[in-house]
Image (tube, rainbow, N blue to C red):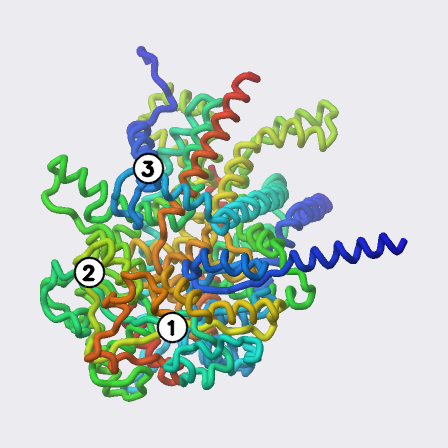
Amino acid sequence: MEEETKQARTGWLLSAPALAILLLAASGPLLVVLVYSFLVKGQYGGVIWTFSTEAWFEVLFTRDIFSDEVTLADAHLAIFWRSVKLSLMTTAIAFAVGFPTAWFIATRPPNRRALWLFLITIPFWTNLLIRTFAINEVIRNEGILNTLMIRAGLIERPIQILYTDTAVLIGMAYVYLPLMVLPLFAAIDRFDMRLLEAAYDLYASRWQVLRRIILPLVKPGIVAGSILVFVPSLGAYVTPRVLGGGKNMMIGNFIELQFGQGRNWPLGAALSMLLLAIVMVALLIYVRAAGRGTGHG
Amino acid sequence: MRHLAAAALLLASTSLAGAAELNLYNWGNYTSPELLAKFEKETGIKVTVTDYDSNDTALAKIEAGGHGFDLVVPSANYVGIFRDKGLLTELDLSKIPNHANIAPEWADVDWDPGRAHSVPWQWGTTAISVNTAVYKGDINTSAVWLEVPDELKGKVNVVPEMNDVVALATMYVGGEPCSEDLEVLKKARDLLIAAKPDWISMDYGATEKLSNNDWAASVNWSGSSMRARLANPDVAYGYPREGFITFMDSVALLRDARNVEEAYSFLNFILEPENAAMISAFARYSPGVAGAAEFLPEDMKTAPEVVIPAEFADKGIFLPACSPKAQEYITAIWTELQK
Amino acid sequence: MGKSFDVTSLPGVPFVAGLAFLALYAPIFTLVAYSFNDANAISIWGGFSFRWYEAAWANREVQAATARSLVIAASASVIATSAATMAALGTTRRGAFRGQTFIYVAINQPLMVPEIVTAVALLIVFATVKVATGYAGLGYLILAHSAFCIPFAYLPIRARLEGMDLSLETAAADLYANPWQTFRHVTLPLMAPGIVAGAMLAFVISLDDVVITEFVKSAGQDTLPTYMLGQMRRAITPEVNAISTALLGLTVALLTVFFLLTRKRE
């Protein structure tokens, strides 16, 4: 008991600087948003300081502007569902590409690993917008990808990739790839390769080795990478706009609309608080489950 | 001792004079660097430009305070909002001798009577750019993007400007911008939703994407359309006879400005016809100053994007600041359109 | 096993990794190529030219924005990585304690809301502070960036530390190393790859940020991303391609020097 108190004190003490910065410049200010979700929207953006639960009502229900009928806000649900779907797919793609890449880097000679890691991050020294425009350049109808495929005789006419959900997926997987690779690398790198030797000596198949040994041991890296990719994808804003052509919104765009042209700050605030709550609960469940998993392994 | 004090004073005063500066908060890529260089050479005032990309962001930041800006350049429908929220200073016209240079049609406008709070930066129109190699039909109608002709299906872009787009659609079905007439709004909504599958995207960047054939048509701004035409001669600019949008961005002095005198020098400076023309030459929109036209680059004097044909001259409408009710309708239509 | 067999090789790994690097660099090469484009637009080839480099060289605004971006990213990544390293040590190296999950969730909170929400919240809070104190310097941007970079630095470090063997540290302690010596000579080198990964992530994340910066910046504090956001509505000039290419060139040059130096020492 004594020991646990001491550990807790050290744990809190070591986490204090991080928590203080977050309290000052992230979580603390969010309280303002929570308060705003219970106020009345201002005529030209902003809020009027009168208590109201209207915004929370609007999150789920909508009063049809023509028939005045109150129905479930299917537009909000559609936007929410699209975001979750695209983010899950992005995470899957990033993992499918990121795991082999991280494995590749972690199995290079030790003095070369840093170089490969830098090679992963160098493209990200160019700004997100520029990178997104460059992807746009590669996949557009007259871009390199289509030109090469036509030259190779794979296709006859350009495939419309730009301004589709595929383009959004490609773009998000690209943008978030290092967020998957780096934590995976950090986990694989400390992995004791002699374990593999032992397994192969015991005639384990490659698939068995991957499933029974590698994946369980790099799980913390998978958890970290998936969170870093999935959660920010949910709120992605630039990629759906530039590569998806902005025809269909994701949650990030929809919330942005409320704080911008839509001039409904309380609704934007309520939507973001709801998103925060959902992600937090999901994360808690995930961490608990993952923690139990590692406990067994 | 006295020497020292005098030296210190001198030092202080020179550093003060050297520190003459001005903070302009303007749309990105909208301020001519030559203009600023000339201003600095003439007055010794160094102008720092900070960018924004939407009226709403600018409004939110200025309303929050502590920003350090002196001048802002809101669109016509936002000048009134800034003013009514008490964010602007009423201009002391005695400090702007060139105020008289404001072109007569812009000297007394609905959104700023007597130009007491703002002076013209530049103005233009929001209408339609069409690649005439792809579509040879009538381009002076919003049908180009609301009832998309076959040649243009899957090649039309619509800029993601909620108020402009809904207003254009409302005018197409015979209503007024900011309408609260449910019949009209319903028609506009149905039309927009029916047209959307024929659009390729709802994005910015028309200048480039019209030039490189990614798009064959777009709801677009006049200056952007002109720059697209210079790169691709097939791009023409159509003025919908059902109604199109005229906009003007104006410079206003903020209530919490710290460099007020410098700001007045700048306001006076940009109302000089030659300087107003420099602003226009950079971004390709029209000046609001009398006599500036003769200083414009040759290619702008006759450009069809700049000179509105007489038959459409009365079809251009300034977007008013919509009522909260109308704004709610617009947002609802937009959400349904983009869900 | 008769023939020599590399246990670390997994089928398809080099292929997918190669493809990944190719995909990562394809847009970058396009970008570099178009920075030498003579045309006014980013995507129409108009012949080879250095005009955008000249334009960027003459454009004080874009240079200042780039320098500001780098200063903010460097400061924020150092602050965020230090705080995150401590927090990771505090939450993984010991037995579970009350509040551990709370700390975990609190540290990851910035990931959970779209940027615009944090941006609006920070605008309101920081504006009040700016008015009250009269200070409107870069400090606000560095603080804001440090905050949202913390989870990006924390997760890789934590992934490294989780389940890390404690025996070396115990051994060091047995050999009468004091806790600081143990940390300095045993723990820190062991966790270094995690720290490097975390710091790199924090740096690029800060370098990329648009929305929060747009709402927190004061007069004259445009960063490269907000400068570009302002341009996006009208047209982005190839000038930014030139700047990005120059920045890439600088990075590669620095890295080469760094690697040549470290190799000599070995």
Q: Secondary structure at mark 1?
A: loop
Residue A214 location, x and y as percent?
A: 40, 32
Q: CA distance from mark 2 to mark 3?
A: 30 Å
**Callouts 3 and 1 close, C-beta under 8 Å:** no
Q: Secondary structure at mark 3?
A: helix
Q: Chain of mark 3?
A: C
Camera-near label (3 vs 1) is: 1
Name which quarter of the figure residue B256 lies in.
bottom right
Q: Chain of mark 2?
A: B
Residue tagged by mark 2? B235
Q: Which mark is residue B166?
A: none
Residue B96 location, x and y as percent?
A: 54, 75
Quick one: label 1, few (<14), some, or many (20+) residues within 10 Å? some
Q: Looking at the image, which residue is at 84% across and 56% down?
A: B5
Q: Looking at the image, which residue is at 33% across and 21% down?
A: A203
Q: Are marks 3 and 1 on the same chain?
A: no
Q: Which mark is residue B291?
A: 1
Name which quarter of the figure residue A104 lies in.
top left
Q: Secondary structure at mark 2?
A: strand
**Whether residue B220 is situated above or below residue C33 in the rendered picture:** below
Report the quarter where the C terminus of chain C lies.
top right
**Whether residue A216 is situated above or below residue C229 in the rendered picture:** above
Q: Looking at the image, which residue is at 40% across and 47% down?
A: C240
Of the image marks 2 and 1, the number of the one nearer the N terminus: 2
Residue tagged by mark 3? C29
Q: Chain of mark 1?
A: B
Quick one: label 2, few (<14), some, or many (20+) residues within 10 Å? many
**Left or right placement of residue C86 versus residue A53 in this view:** right
Amino acid carrying mark 1 in the image:
Gly
Amino acid carrying mark 2 in the image:
Val
**Left or right placement of residue A232 versus residue C147 in this view:** left
Between B327 and C32, the residue placed more toward the observer is C32
